[in-house]
Image (cartoon, helix red, strand yellow):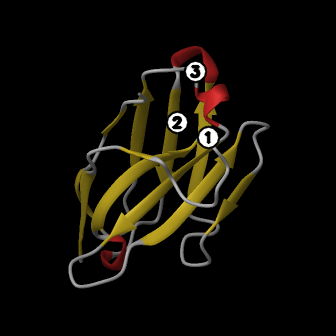
């Protein structure tokens, strides 16, 4: 069983920055694909950023150039650096792992709230 624990959410003004952390109970190298999703009230869940075990990354168009996903194998932690935040980035952010490479996560964290005020 893999446990993922997010932290770093909070309230920030538009244009500000936050860094989310996701601490895994196992080596993140073993988790194949890790990703951040978000869900705003009344909206569908959205894939924000993905990082593979080799360090390859991809991003939703809505966050390209503003968000950066990275991993620290020594700390078993994945990060999401969020810059130039906008009110539309307000959501609960979830850390996930796709250990079987089946195209969808099989482990989820509990989520962390990010609120961007205008």
The label number, if any, that marks residue 27 in the structure image: 3
Mark 1 highlights which residue?
70
The residue at the point 52 percent across, 65 percent down is 48
Q: Marks 1 and 2: CB-CB under 8 Å? A: yes
The picture places residue 64, in percent across and down from the top left corner, at 63, 69
Q: Secondary structure at mark 2?
A: strand
Q: Secondary structure at mark 1?
A: strand
Q: How many marks?
A: 3
How packed is label 3: few (under 14 Cα within 10 Å), some, or many (20 or more)? some
The residue at the point 28 percent across, 74 percent down is 40
The picture places residue 101, in percent across and down from the top left corner, at 67, 50
Mark in the foreground, 2 or 3: 3
The residue at the point 32 percent across, 70 percent down is 39
Q: Which quadrant of the rendered structure holds the N terminus?
A: top left
Mark 2 highlights which residue?
78
Q: Secondary structure at mark 3?
A: loop
């Amino acid at each position: 069983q893999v446990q993922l624990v997010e932290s770093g959410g909070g309230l920030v003004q538009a244009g500000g920055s936050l860094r989310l952390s996701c601490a895994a109970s196992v080596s993140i190298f073993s988790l194949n694909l890790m990703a951040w999703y978000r869900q705003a009230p009344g909206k569908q869940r959205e894939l924000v950023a993905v990082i593979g075990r080799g360090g390859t990354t991809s991003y939703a168009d809505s966050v390209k150039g503003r968000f950066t996903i990275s991993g620290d194998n020594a700390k078993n932690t994945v990060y999401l650096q969020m810059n130039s935040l906008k009110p539309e980035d307000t959501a609960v952010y979830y850390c996930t792992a796709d250990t079987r490479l089946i195209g969808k996560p099989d482990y989820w964290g509990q989520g962390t709230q990010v609120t961007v005020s205008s």
